Image (spheres, grey):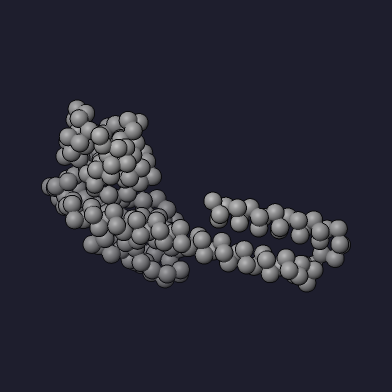
Amino acid sequence: MTSLAELTDTLDRALPQTQCTRCGYPDCRSYAAAIADGSADINQCPPGGAEGVARLARLTGRPATPLNPANGTEGPRLLAIIDEAWCIGCTLCIKACPVDSIVGAPKRMHTVIDDLCTGCELCVPVCPVDCISLEPVTPGRTGWDAWTTPQADEARERFAFHTMRLVREKTENDARLEQKAEAKLADLASHSKITDPAVLDTKRAIIEAALARARAKRAQ
């Protein structure tokens, strides 16, 4: 008998991996898990289109139904294009991209690596100067006809790396903050303008409690 995890893996491989969230879930695998446990329908993935619904129908034994219009419509694959003349280098689109297909630095021009862009559209609403447009790059071809399995596999791998990178960066940042807090705690009087011993004791207790919570969270 196929386990829930195995079914989730199978369904995840049948999704286009654009990580666009239009299905109503934060990523493709979360949507696959929801289909597997019966809490989501199989017609919520516009990038997969009708062919995507048919694939999920074959894997689940459910009837193929038209795409739910609440999730969007099937269309050609899109490519994000940054108007470099207007880009202010805010890095918000870089942070929004689920597959790290946008490169740049703070206050420097950003650009999209065309071959890696999944057309997820997530970079568009975060741009404060509206300098990102989406252009169809597969006119006449939609859904899986505009997207290949190798592209989906690469997008899945890049999303996994993106997720791991964010976790690593958060862990490293939390460690830096903890080290700073411990350094201040070791000689709180010299790190503070507070001179009242009672107030310093209160401040020390607050920092110690915060450090304890951070250690407990890390241990979990």
Residue 202 higher or lower than 192, as above or below = above
The image position of residue 137, as x and y in percent, is 19, 55
219, 123: nearer the viewer: 219
Is residue 130 among what the camera can see?
no
For image coordinates 29% across by 31% down, the residue present is: 41
The image position of residue 124, as x and y in percent, is 36, 53
104, 44: nearer the viewer: 44
Along the horizontal axis of the image, is 131 left or right of 145? right
118, 216: nearer the viewer: 216
- The image quadrant where one finds the N terminus is top left
The image position of residue 112, as x and y in percent, is 30, 63
Is residue 166 among what the camera can see?
yes
Along the horizontal axis of the image, is 85 left or right of 215? left
96, 129: nearer the viewer: 96
Give residue 21's quadrant in the image: top left
Instruction: Please give the count of numbered marks on the rendered protein.
Output: 0
For image coordinates 39% across by 56% down, the residue present is: 163
Residue 142 higher or lower than 189, as above or below = above
For image coordinates 23% across by 52% down, the residue present is: 152
Along the horizontal axis of the image, is 133 left or right of 88? left
Give residue 178's quadrant in the image: bottom right
For image coordinates 80% across by 68% down, the residue present is: 189
Tell which residue pokes out farthest to the top in this image: 63
Residue 80 higher or lower than 6, as above or below = below
